[in-house]
Amino acid sequence: MLLRKSLLLTVIALCVAIAPSFGQAAAKKAVPAKAEAAAGLIDINSADAATLKSIPGIGDAYSAKIIANRPYKGKDEIVKKAGVPQGVYDKIKDKIIAKQK
């Protein structure tokens, strides 16, 4: 009887000790999405024209071309597919993302 109680207490102690690590794993998965939001990254695959035009160097024409040539597998595709100049892309590449569905 004493052995069963000891075994039970050991199992409970292990569960209590391990439980916080499961919560940390879930929290780590949520960090990238929060980091994107905090960084203010704009998804070129879903942003509307007004949001795209808020990016420096992207006006009416480029925002229309970006929307018309969706989807993008990578953010760098806006240079070839939408005709955004390489110099403009180099300036905005840290402000955009191309999320996949």
Image (cartoon, rainbow, N blue to C red):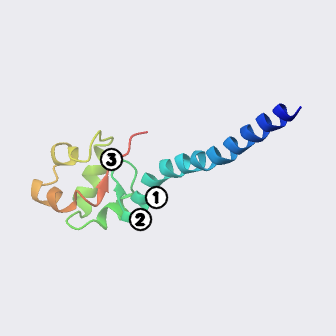
- Residue 98 numbered mark, or none: 3
Between 61 and 4, the one lying in front of the other is: 4
- Residue 95 numbered mark, or none: none
How packed mark 2 is, by other alpha carbons closer than 10 Å (few <14, some 14-19, many 20 or more), is few
Task: Report the amino acid beneath label 3.
Answer: Ala
Q: Nearer the viewer, mark 1 or mark 3?
A: 1
Task: Report the amino acid beneath label 2.
Answer: Ala
Task: Give the CA separation, mark 2 to mark 1.
Answer: 6 Å
Residue 47 % position (x, y): 39, 55
> Which quarter shows the N terminus?
top right
Residue 31 % position (x, y): 46, 54
Q: Are marks 1 and 3 in contact (CB under 8 Å)?
A: no
Q: Is residue 6 above or below residue 25?
A: above
Q: Nearer the viewer, mark 2 or mark 3?
A: 2
Q: Are marks 2 and 1 in contact (CB under 8 Å)?
A: yes
Asked if residue 17 lies left or right of residue 55, the reply is: right
Q: Which residue is mark 2?
A: 38
Task: Give the CA separation, mark 1 to mark 3.
Answer: 16 Å
Task: Report the amino acid beneath label 1.
Answer: Lys
> Which quarter shows the C terminus?
top left
Q: Quadrant of residue 53?
A: bottom left
Q: Which residue is mark 1?
A: 34
Secondary structure category for the residue under label 1: helix
Residue 22 % position (x, y): 59, 45
Residue 21 % position (x, y): 57, 47
Question: What residue sits 16% from the left and 53% below the top?
Answer: 84
**If you read the primary sequence from the N terminus, does the residue marked by circle 2 or circle 3 appear first?**
2
